[in-house]
Amino acid sequence: MEFNHADLFEGLADAIGDRVAVVCGDTRLTYAELEAHANRLAHFLLERGVRPGEHVGIQLYNGIEYIAGLLATLKIRAVPINVNYRYVEAELRYLYTDSDIVALLYDTEFDARVAATAPEAPKLRTLVAVGGPSKVQDAVPYDQAIAGRPDGREGFQKRSGDDVYIIYTGGTTGMPKGVMWHNRDLFMAFGGGNPYGEPHTEPRQVIEQAVNSGPIIMMPAAPLMHGAAQMGTFIAWWMGATAVYTRKFDAVEVLRVVEREKVLTINITGDAMARPLAEEIATGAYDLSSLLVLSSTGAILTGTVRDRLQELLPNVMIVDSFGSTESGFTASAVAGSSPESGLKYRPIATATLAVLNEVLEPVKPGSGEMGTVAKTGDIAFGYYNDPAKTAATFVTDTAGTRWLLTGDLARIEDDGTILVFGRGSQCINSGGEKVFPEEVEAVLKGHPSVFDAVVTGIPDERWGSRVAAVVEPRDGANLTAEELDAHCRERISGYKVPRTYAFVDHMVRSPSGKADYRWAKETAQSAAP
């Protein structure tokens, strides 16, 4: 057994096979049943000629088929590729081609888009349709694909901790990029199989931990096409837990499932999920007494939202984690920190973090010097099909240490905590003053009539860039730019206050809750005088 996700899951299936591994809707599969299901799909992919190192796309909503597709791909040493189900045809053409997928599992709800784009993907030769009849030519129905296939592991090759795992991350300004990991590094970067203690040094320890654990129920609430939900699933399994999903994120359905399944921990991504959950929790319609931990990864919780959740869930531990698709889980927010007051994080014991200056030297703690948050050790090793981006992000210092530059600008305090200001790529330079969108967004979201806000820079003849805000008011709110201007001027310096406001009925965000700054910039510019 290696620190390989497929190896470890098979070890769990052998050791705790009768325990429930996944629940989605009315479907419940034990570890042994999921193992057999994934094996049948793996044998189908092998019969279709999918070989080690080749890429299998998964364009599905949450469900058993997504989990089985992930496991089946890893079992045959192929590489899973997460496809954003919100992508339109132009984005799908890019992703299918850039990722070099040779097979695709897709929901039949996406028939039209798949039919229009799949024929243009040069390496795509096998399509598997999930959810009913498909009009896509030569697509194999999912049930037919797994029917009659062996449910054992015969014919699978020996795996390695160096087998590749790719997570495409949508980013905020451009086309998605495929973050490449080795299985072992990915395992270690997301908790090392023991997120609350020392990382495991032997694969067998993961199995022993799962055997000795109790009946824990954990819920990755984000879409599985987002890396955080995939990693949340594996972390649940390494603890011997049951992973519970809803097909799509809906606050009402999520809370019903938490109540029905007696969920212990739930993982969300930032305000985009936290706000609707808080509003629904406030109705008092749910028994959430089983819930002990609510954690947010992949997007920042603003202070007002986190405080509201804590008020509604006084006995629940709310954890705000820091990390990225390239770095894994690296730090946790210090109590009381927020984008409004300053994001302060304490590195976890297993993460080797630093704040580096322009010549890749660590800045001195307490010096006040700003640098870029960087991580070494267990990190991704590059971007698929993008050597230029790889070279700019993964750098080596004069001592030969390889670093991941996260792009987050920060200072390091005397006590070793890291004060993060925001993404350097999104920093707005207005008349020589630096404005970090995250801080202004958090202040805007603190207004009682604001449901969501994204801040960006737009061209300005005098200042170079002007701070602009795209705002989604709460339902029924009669919100004005003058009201928001007064609200902001009481809380932040004048140069940070937006000069342009664009009010929208619905904010465009990724399924993971990330802001779409490209869309926000276009929307703000169209509203500018």
Image (spheres, grey):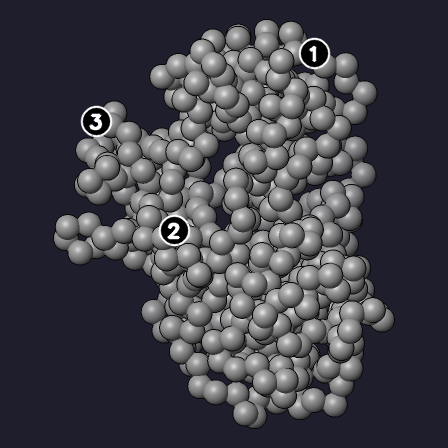
In terms of depth relative to the viewer, which is nearer, 331 or 377? 377
Amino acid identity at mark 1:
Thr
Judge from the rendering whether residue 15 lies leftward or rightward of residue 107; answer left or right. Answer: left
In terms of depth relative to the viewer, which is nearer, 276 or 388? 388
How far apart in space, not on screen, are marks 1 and 2 (Cα)? 41 Å
Task: Name the residue beneath numbered marker 3.
Answer: 367
Tell me the mark number nearer the camera, choosing from 3 and 2.
2
- Provide residue 180's location: percent of width, then percent of height: 43, 62
Task: Name the residue beneath numbered marker 2.
Answer: 389
Q: Secondary structure at mark 3?
A: loop
Judged from this view, the residue extending furthest toward the right is 133
Of labels 1 and 3, earlier in sequence is 3
Of labels 1 and 2, earlier in sequence is 2
Asked whether residue 208 is in view, the answer is no
Tell me the mark number nearer the camera, choosing from 1 and 3.
1
How far apart in space, not on screen, are marks 3 and 2 (Cα)? 30 Å
Amino acid identity at mark 3:
Ser
Picture disc at residue 480: 1
Q: In the rendered view, tell whether residue 286 sits above or below residue 17.
A: above
In the rendered view of the protein, which quadrant contains the C terminus?
top right
Residue at 52% from the left image edge and 14% from the top image edge: 497
